[in-house]
Image: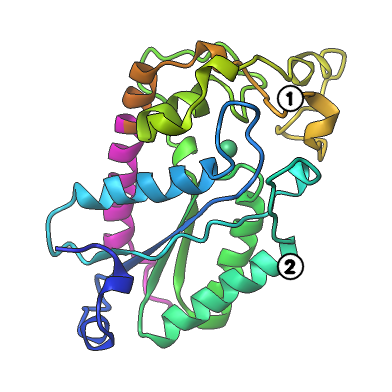
Amino acid sequence: MTHLLANLTTDEVAALDPATAVIVQPIGAIEQHGPHLPIVTDALVAERMTSLAIEGLAPGCNIWQLPTLSYGKSTEHLGRAGTVALSATTLMAVCLDLGRSLAASGFKKLVFVNGHGGQPGLLDVVARDIRVETGLEVFPMMPGRLGLPEGVEPVDPDYGIHGGQIETSIVWALEPSLVKMHLAVRDGDAAGSIFAGYAHLTLEGAVPTAWVTDDLSATGVLGDPTAATLELGQAIVAHQVAALREVLLEIQTFAFPPRA
Ligand SMILES: [Zn+2]
């Protein structure tokens, strides 16, 4: 029993019930993640979280995973080896084309499961464009925003946003062979201290500062990956996958009220 839409035939896709079908597009990034994590990190997280979530649902749930869009908008990491970025306009055009294609196939609901913190704003914008142009209902979301297990307090909460304790633990749980813990270093402390004298300016808050990695980190890490553990990663993955499963089921039943 597959949950991978691309493994179906065109006739099988055509036979799906469009009233309940939910199409899930994992979106990641191919970008530097410091000396200890692979450049595929964000694509891996988006893809695996999506698979784990859908695999835990009842067979025949009519929720389908598309092939991962591995590339994302990684402008903040450009110039660091291995970063392969799409421009904002390219990524928006690709997402719009995906939405048009899915609408033309008769689908009604599309979810972007995003693994990269550099593009939620873009996905919010293009989601609304797809909705207005095609009528498709679009739900852009990030598993990383679904919270942490009760009692988990990151050691690097202010600046641990890239290759830090949380993300490193998650990759460790998903694909241990790709994590080089002996190379993990804490970096990016400036991101926690640089705004100390400011009332409003922050890294990612109410008045963000359009930072690039070179402003904040020599190694490319923002956070403290030395505090990562396998057990923490397993707990976070279980927590976020369970929440993602709930999200997908909510999306499946959600409907705006009919217009007057
Ligand atoms: Zn990442």
Local SS, label 2: helix
Q: Which residue is mark 1?
A: 219
The one nearer the camera, 252 or 173, is 173
Whether 203 is drawn above or below 12: the answer is above
What is the x, y in percent for residue 144?
Answer: 48, 36
On the rendering, which quadrant does ligand 1 occupy? top right
Q: Is mark 2 within 8 Å of ligand 1?
A: no
What is the x, y in percent for residue 36?
Answer: 58, 26
Q: Is residue 217 left or right of residue 23?
A: right
Q: Residues within 10 Å of mark 2 (few under 14, many from 20)?
A: few
Q: Residues within 10 Å of mark 1 (few under 14, many from 20)?
A: some
Badge number at residue 94: none
Local SS, label 1: loop
| Magenta stretch bounds | 238-260
What is the x, y in percent for residue 114?
Answer: 51, 50
How would you classify the magenta stretch by its main secondary structure?
helix
Image quadrant in which you'd find residue 39: top right
- Inspect the magenta stretch and tell me whether residue 241 lies in it: yes
> Residue placed at 46% from the left, 33% from the top?
178
Q: Which residue is mark 2?
A: 89
Q: CA distance from mark 2 to mark 1?
A: 28 Å
Q: Is residue 111 left or right of residue 35?
A: left
Whether 165 is drawn above or below 167: the answer is above
What is the x, y in percent for residue 89?
Answer: 74, 67
Is residue 147 visible in the rendered structure shown here? no
Residue type, mark 2 in image = Thr
> Residue placed at 41% from the left, 31% from the top?
177
Image quadrant in which you'd find residue 32: top right
Is residue 27 visible in the rendered structure shown here? yes
> Residue placed at 51% from the left, 29% from the top?
167
On-image quarter of the C terminus: bottom left
- Inspect the magenta stretch and tell me whether residue 246 lies in it: yes
